[in-house]
Image (cartoon, rainbow, N blue to C red):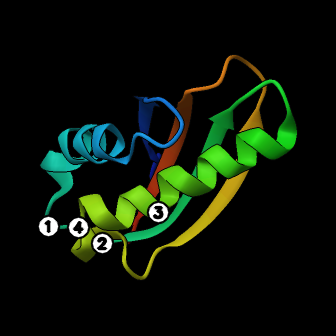
């Protein structure tokens, strides 16, 4: 049986890495001892390229927020239409 991903919603202005890191740390505290296998990140923006760029920025913040959890994780940058400045993440951890 496949495990459900941990879902995280993040809201931060483009370029606000400090806020991204803070929110990612808070959202993943209970999983601190785990290691992520892969993360799907859906950046919201009116245009696909901007949404993917935002998702890429969030994925870089993951590694700053929790290096032990995300250093070796595979990440994918996706676009989800909507106003800029938020992202939805699906985090899949290795099973124990």
**Residue on which disc 4 sits:** 34
Pick whichever of labels 1 and 3 is earlier in the sequence.
Answer: 1
Categorize mark 1 by other alpha carbons within 10 Å: few (<14), some (14-19), many (20+): few
| Label 2 residue SS | loop
Q: CA distance from mark 4 to mark 3?
A: 18 Å
The numbered mark, 3 or 2, whose residue comes first in the sequence reads: 2
Question: Mark 4: which secondary structure?
Answer: loop
Cα–Cα span, label 2 and label 4: 4 Å
Circle on res. 33:
1
**Distance from label 2 to label 1 (Cα)?**
7 Å
> Is 76 above or below relative to 43?
below
Residue beneath disc 3 = 60
Which residue is at the front of the view, 92 or 48? 48
Residue 93: % across, % down: 38, 64
Dot 2 and dot 4 residues touching (CB under 8 Å)? yes
x, y percentage for residue 59?
A: 50, 58
Residue marked by disc 2:
35
Q: Is residue 83 left or right of residue 33?
A: right
Q: Position of residue 22 (x, y in %)?
A: 22, 41
70 and 61: which is toward the camera: 61
Residue drawn at the location 64% of the way across and 24% of the way down? 84
* For the residues bearing labels 1 and 4, Cβ distance under 8 angstroms: yes
Foreground disc of the pair 1, 3: 3
């Amino acid at each position: 049986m496949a495990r459900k991903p941990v879902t995280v919603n993040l809201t931060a202005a483009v370029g606000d890495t400090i806020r991204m890191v803070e929110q990612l740390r808070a959202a993943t505290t209970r999983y601190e001892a785990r290691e992520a296998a892969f993360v799907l990140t859906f950046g919201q923006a009116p245009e696909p390229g901007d949404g993917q760029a935002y998702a890429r920025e969030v994925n870089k913040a993951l590694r700053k927020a929790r290096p032990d959890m995300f250093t070796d994780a595979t990440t994918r940058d996706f676009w989800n239409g909507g106003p800029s400045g938020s992202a939805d993440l699906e985090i899949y951890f290795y099973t124990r």
